[in-house]
Image (spheres, rainbow, N blue to C red):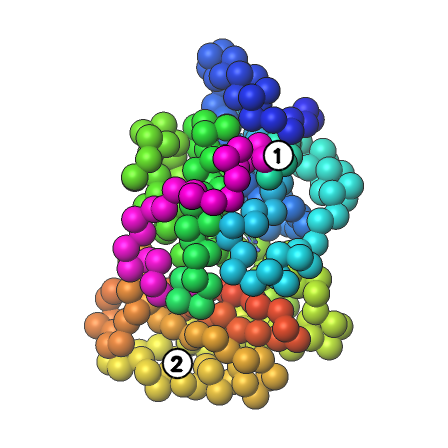
Amino acid sequence: MIIFHKSADLLPFLRRSKATGNRIGFVPTMGALHQGHLNLVEAARKSCNLVVVSIFVNPTQFNDPNDFARYPTPLAKDLDLLLAQGCHVLYLPTTADIYPLGLQHLPQYQLGYLDTILEAQYRPGHFQGVCQVVDRLLQAVAPTTLFLGQKDLQQCRVIARMLEQTPHGQTTQLTIINTVRESDGLAMSSRNMHLSAEGRKKAVAIYEALQMLQQKLHTGAVDWLLQEAETYLRAAGLTPEYVCIADAVSLQPCTEWDGKQPLVALIAAYLEGVRLIDNMLLTTN
Ligand code: AMP
């Protein structure tokens, strides 16, 4: 595995590799890697010849400074995991390499309603920050395929929109990989490590609430069901920020279901001061 710290070194290396016909798969991460990240690497290995992973905790996407300050950075462990997974290139940039002109006056993206609902409503500026970093990373890597996790479904939709608005859309394909879960169903997340042993057990309520939404969904109004899921989360000791059933593609909230529209259930909830998110595509029977 080759480690690059500067885009000025990385880009020519990758250009040469592409010129020999290699397909470049790119997995952007913030580190503290787990099996969810590693599945993205695995998917990239299967469909591309050269796999690039980036680790960069992007300051511009944190609306909560405490969340940024305590974001885990176990770099030595991450390196071992990437080596074992067969990653070819690790891009480990400094903030100055990503934002050479500083953190002021960064580009803004036209994300429409995606920048007003769900995550965007509770984390103002978050998706502008996500687009700023992914746009820069794509400039540095110019991948054939970008691999993202469904765990952050709204982020996937946002980045798809950003790709449409930038030249990357012409050259980079987006592939979304299923959420990897712990054995009890909790979605793997770098933030899970902030939970106490007791909190870790309670956190599974998010997955259970999503399953409940899946099982009880029927045609007509969905509000009663959202209320039920919220009550379930509160009873389990979590503080829900949102519980939503939305169109699976546009993420527009659904209030009345016609029995056909593909839907997704999305939850954000706090537990022991940790903000957890998850979602589940709702299958129609
Ligand atoms: P992060 O390091 O949290 O920014 O995540 C980097 C990438 O890994 C994003 O595309 C995430 O959606 C994806 N990811 C995070 N957790 C999971 C998971 N449990 N399963 C699948 N992908 C994930």
Q: Is 52 colored magenta in this rendering? A: no
Residue at numbered disc 1 = 93
Q: Is residue 36 left or right of residue 15?
A: right
| Label placed on residue 271 | none
Q: Kindly identify the amino acid type of the residue bearing the numbered disc 1.
A: Pro
- When the figure is inspected, residue 141 is found, relative to residue 248, above or below; the finding is above
Q: Which residue sits at x=35%, y=77%? A: 217
Picture quadrant where residue 40 is located: top right
Image quadrant where one finds the C terminus: bottom left
Q: Which residues are magenta?
A: 96-119
Q: Which residue sits at x=57%, y=68%? A: 275
Mark 2: is the Cβ under 8 angstroms from ligand 1? no
Judge by depth and name the residue closer to the eye, 267 or 93: 93
SS label for mark 2: helix
Image quadrant where one finds the N terminus: top right
SS label for mark 1: loop
| Label placed on residue 226 | 2
